[in-house]
Image (cartoon, rainbow, N blue to C red):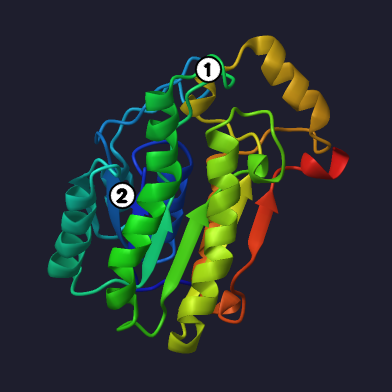
């Protein structure tokens, strides 16, 4: 097992990519804290239509230990409590996966300033806060790993004036923090998913989804497991000399742009 007995937090872990990462970590022997705004998984109109069981239940089916901590990642005090509960329950922290994110459609004239603040607050600011609070605990680990989930939209526009800039900043933050903690043997990397079959895609129309399909060279969309296996690699000993980079997992989407 690649992550045996390591303690991980996966934010936004009830559904989608976070759920996939949490269960694959468990499959590899990790003890996983799942945190989200709600424990029940989201169910989409295009994808994840039949997802019912809580992620922790799936973790336990794999023979691993799991813990759900309800957290609003936009609330600093709740993020602090999340880290505290993890350390108290499992005795430490080895891996932080900042996956929680939201998207509110609209161009600069359509999206309200309040909604812009909300997207940036969750997609960027909460990642800084969680990482800041987690680092003192990761310093005590022999296997300190921070994995930030960004997006292919970090490399271009088209996802609105809040989401794309926030994800671009996440990639750059990973580089900056990698330099900060490298001497303490903590790695910091980002993963940039393309179109993944999750409930978050509900805001798209079928025509928009087909357009993305046509622009994706490999003949299928991504699955949460595709991102999860990449996260397993970055969290494992196999990636101990990889830091400050971003891994694009998109079926070739941005290669064709």
Q: Where does residue 189 sit, x and y in percent of width and height?
A: 56, 65
- Name the disc covering residue 61, or none: 2
State which tag comes first along the sequence, 1 or 2: 2
Near-viewer residue (182 or 203): 182
- Name the disc covering residue 251, or none: none
- Name the disc covering residue 203, or none: 1
Q: Is residue 172 above or below residue 180?
A: above
Name of the residue lying farthest toward the right: 256
Near-viewer residue (106 or 192): 106
In which quarter of the view is residue 62 placed? bottom left
Residue at 30% x, 60% y is 64
Quarter of the picture containing the C terminus is top right
| CB contact under 8 Å: marks 1 and 2 | no
Residue at 44% x, 39% y is 120
Q: Is residue 251 above or below residue 85?
A: above
Give the side of residue 208 with respect to residue 179, left or right: right
Mark 1 vs mark 2: give the one in front: 1
Near-viewer residue (50 or 123): 123
Can residue 255 be seen by looking at this rendering?
yes
As helix, strand or loop, the secondary structure at mark 1 comes to helix
Near-viewer residue (72 or 46): 72
Q: Where does residue 188 sit, x and y in percent of width and height?
A: 51, 69
Name of the residue lying farthest toward the bottom: 183
Q: Where does residue 201 sit, x and y in percent of width and height?
A: 54, 24
As helix, strand or loop, the secondary structure at mark 2 comes to helix
Count up the numbered dots: 2
């Amino acid at each position: 097992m690649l992550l045996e007995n390591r303690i991980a937090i996966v934010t936004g872990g009830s559904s989608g990519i976070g759920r996939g990462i949490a269960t694959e970590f468990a499959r590899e022997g990790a003890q996983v804290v799942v945190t989200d705004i709600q424990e029940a998984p989201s169910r989409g109109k295009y994808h994840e239509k039949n997802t019912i069981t809580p992620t922790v239940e799936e973790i336990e089916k794999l023979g691993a230990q799991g813990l759900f901590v309800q957290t609003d990642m936009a609330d600093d005090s709740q993020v602090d409590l999340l880290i505290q509960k993890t350390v108290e329950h499992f005795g430490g922290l080895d891996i932080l996966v900042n996956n929680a994110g939201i998207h509110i459609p609209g161009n600069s004239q359509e999206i309200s300033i309040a909604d812009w603040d909300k997207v940036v607050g969750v997609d960027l600011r909460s990642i800084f806060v969680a990482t800041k609070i987690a680092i003192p605990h990761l310093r005590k680990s022999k296997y300190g790993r921070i994995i930030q989930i960004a997006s292919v939209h970090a490399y271009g526009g088209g996802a609105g004036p809040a989401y794309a800039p926030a994800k671009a900043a996440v990639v750059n933050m990973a580089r900056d923090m990698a330099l900060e903690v490298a001497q303490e043997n903590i790695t910091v990397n980002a993963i940039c998913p393309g179109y993944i079959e999750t409930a978050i895609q509900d805001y798209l129309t079928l025509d928009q989804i087909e357009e993305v399909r046509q622009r994706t060279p490999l003949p299928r969309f991504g699955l949460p497991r595709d991102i999860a296996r990449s996260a397993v690699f970055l969290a494992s000993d196999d990636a101990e000399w990889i830091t400050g980079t971003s891994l694009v997992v998109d079926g070739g989407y941005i290669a064709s742009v």
